[in-house]
Image (spheres, rainbow, N blue to C red):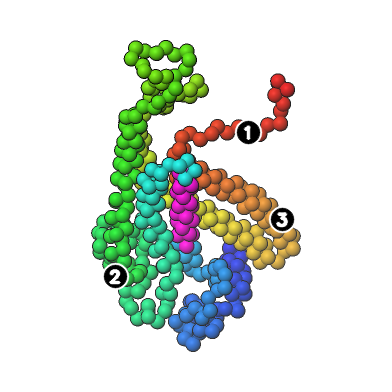
Amino acid sequence: MRQSRDAHMSTEFWFAVTRHRWKFTDESDMACGIDNCEDPGAANPPLKPYPFGFDPIWKISKNSLAMFNSYKMKLSIVLGVTHMIVGIFNSFWNAVHFQENLDIFFVFIPQILFMCSIFGYLVLLIVVKWMTDWNSVECQNDPNCQPPDLKAILIGMFMSPGHVPPENTLFRGQAVVQVILLLLALVCIPWMLLPRPLLLRRRHYHKIRYESLVPSSSTEEHQPGDTDDTVFVKKGEGAGDGDKPEKEFNFQDIFVGQLIHTIEFVLGAVSNTASYLRLWALSLAHSELSDVFLEKLIFFPLSSGNIVIVLVGFLVWIAATLGVLMGMESLSAFLHALRLHWVEFQNKFYNIHGTGRKFIPLTLKRSEEE
C-alpha cells in the first residue's frame, strides 16, 4: 500500500508539471496536447515542440525507459565518433609539425575516410532519424514510413550491399551511397598498410645511393690515390665530431609495425565505438538512482503526512545525493571519462611519431648542487 501511495504522489507531481501542455481524458490511456486534442482517442502531441530538453510527460510514460535508453545509446555513439575523429585530426597536426607528408597522405587521410565512411555514416543516420517527423501526415499515409532499425541498416550495408529494404530507407539513393562508402572503407585498408612502408624503403635506398663530400680533418691521413683535401664518406659517418650515425633502417620492423597499426585501427574502430556505450550505462544508472532517491526519500515521506518522517527523509535524501550521486557517481564518471581519453582518444594520434618526451613533474625541491 505504501508503494502505491508514493508512486501515486510521483505521478500526481508530474501531472501537475505537464498540465500546461497535455490533457488527460478517459477516452485514451495516453494524453493529448491541449492545442491538438480534437480527437482525444488519437492522443496527438502538442503542435509546438518542447522548447529545450525532454518534455516532462516522459517521466510518467509507460515507454519512458525504452525511449530514454534508445536516445542515450545513440547520443553516446555520436559523442564517441566525434571524439575519435578529433583524435584522428590530432594525428594530422602532429604530421604537419614533424613535416611527415607520408603520414598525412597514407595515415591521416585513409583513417579519417575509413572512420567517416562507416561510423560517420552511422552518426548521419542517427541525426536523420532524429530530425524526421514520423507523425507527419505524409508519413502516416505511407506504410513504409516508420522509424528504421539502424543496427539492421549497418549490418545490411556489409551483408547485402546495394539492397536496402523499404522499411529501412531514410533517404533517396541510400543503397548507392552505402555501396560507395563500403568500397571506400575497403580501399582504405590497403591504403593504410602498403604505401607508407614501401615509400620509406624507397626513400632509404635513394639516400644511400649518394655519398656526401665532407672536408677531411687535419689529423686524417690521405690514402694513396687521393688528389685533393676531401674524402668520400657516407651520410652520418664522420660528418662531424658531434654527429651520430643515422638509425639503422629495418624494412621488416617498419612493415610489421604498420601492419599492427592498421589492424589495431580497423578493429579498434568497432571496439572503441562500442566502448563509448559506457556513457549510456553511466547515465542510465545515475537517472535510476535519482528516481529511487526521489520517490523513496521525498515522495514517500510526504505521502505519510508525518513531519518527522518528512524531515528525516529529506536529510537522508541530502546525504544520499551528496554522497552517492555527487560523490561516488562523479568519481565513477571521471574514471570512465579518463579511460576513454587514454585509450579510445589518444591511440588515434599518440606515439605515432616516436616515443614522445619523458614527463618530468614540477618540483620545488632544490638540487643538492645548489
Dominant SS in magenta: helix
Assign a secondary structure to mark 1.
loop
Tag 2's secondary structure?
Answer: helix
Q: Residue at x 34, y 12 (%)?
A: 224
Give the residue pinned by disc 1. Answer: 361
Query: Quick check: 139 above or below 119?
Result: below
* The C terminus sits in image quarter: top right
Quarter of the image where the N terminus is located: bottom right
At a point 41% along the width and 67% down the height, the residue shown is: 128
Residue that extends furthest to the front in the rendered view of this protein: 227
User: Which marked residue is nearer to the observer: mark 3 or mark 2?
Assistant: 2
Q: Amino acid at mark 1?
A: Pro
Query: Label 3, label 2: how many angstroms apart (C-alpha)?
Result: 56 Å
Q: Decide: marks 1, 2 in contact (CB < 8 A)?
A: no
List x then y, in percent, for residue 293: 62, 57
x and y, in percent, of residue 178 in the image? 31, 61
Cα separation between marks 3 and 1: 43 Å
Tell me which label, 1 or 2, sits earlier in the chain.
2
Give the percent coordinates (x, y) of residue 247.
41, 27
Q: Is residue 61 left or right of residue 135?
A: right
Total numbered badges shown on the rendered structure: 3
Pointer 1 local density, CA inside 10 Å: few below 14, some 14–19, many at least 20: few
**Which element type, helix, strand or loop, lies under badge 3?**
helix
- Look at the image and give the residue range highlighted in magenta: 71-95
Could you tell me which residue is drawn at 32 percent across and 68 percent down?
169
Q: Which residue is mark 3?
A: 315
> What residue is pinned by disc 2?
166
Q: Position of residue 42 (x, y in %)?
A: 44, 82
Q: Which dot, 1 or 2, sits closer to the camera? A: 1
Label 3 is placed on what type of residue? Leu
